[in-house]
Image: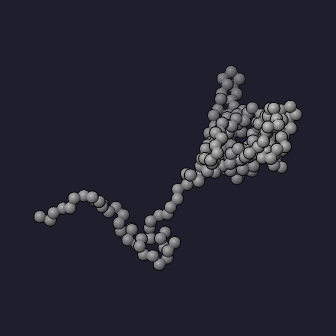
Amino acid sequence: MINLDSYAAIQTNLFVRIDVPTLGVLKFSDYYKAYTVNSESYTSLGSLVSVSDTISELKLSGTELNVSISGIPTQNMDAVLDYKIKGAPITVYRVLFDVTTGAQLVVSGNPAIKFAGIVNNYNLVEEFDSVSKNSQVTINFVCTSNIGIIQNRVSGRRTNPDDQKLFFPADVSMDRVPSLVGANFNFGAPLRSNA
């Protein structure tokens, strides 16, 4: 927990780090100037970056987060579509600053990780201005937290002879499963009389 008792006012800014496998690491923030966090320099996008609100919880949960970047020229859309953004790891840091001096607060836990997960999906929204004949695009990253990934994971294994032999080579208990495929079992049906 960060102790802020000695500060009358603070400013918070968000620093987003997305590791796109085929592109590299994207680092941007809603701060007013380029800034270094954890020895990495983040590009300032200011009000062009929007991050959805989150709920502070005592227990970890599988929340989602939306990160939007607006004002992208349409000529850059091919580059966005060429890279494998879906599934890229994302981390959002919250950094606390002193309002009067603009300096990062020197307190334990600053910067703090606000969100860690992956980009689950993304969408593009184009805004066309018919007067100027220009358009700008907003890209919205829909992100799932690491806890959400674990909660949505399907666990278990298939019930067939090959998978059974993979775990237990001498076991023959699943050898008859292929012959039972499509068989109809009327559990609980009344017995038929042979009369």
186 vs 173, left or right, is left
Quarter of the figure with residue 58: top right
Residue ID at (78%, 42%): 3
Assign the C terminus to one quadrant of the image. Answer: bottom left
- Asked whether residue 120 is in view, the answer is no
Indicate the position of residue 177 as horizontal and vertical percent values.
39, 68
- Asked whether residue 60 is in view, the answer is yes
Quarter of the figure with residue 33: top right
Question: Against 71, is 22 above or below?
Answer: below
Q: Residue furthest right?
A: 101
Q: Residue furthest top?
A: 131
Indicate the position of residue 155 as horizontal and vertical percent values.
52, 59
**Front residue (pair 16, 128):** 16
**Front residue (pair 68, 10):** 10
**Front residue (pair 76, 145):** 145
Residue ID at (42%, 75%): 172
Indicate the position of residue 42 as horizontal and vertical percent values.
80, 43
**Front residue (pair 166, 84):** 166
Q: What kind of colouring is applied to the model shown?
A: one colour
Q: Residue furthest left?
A: 195
Question: Against 188, is 174 above or below?
Answer: below
Q: Residue furthest bottom?
A: 170
Question: Against 39, is 141 above or below?
Answer: above
Residue ID at (51%, 72%): 167
181 vs 188, left or right, is right
Residue ID at (47%, 64%): 158
Assign the N terminus to one quadrant of the image. Answer: top right
Indicate the position of residue 34 as horizontal and vertical percent values.
83, 39
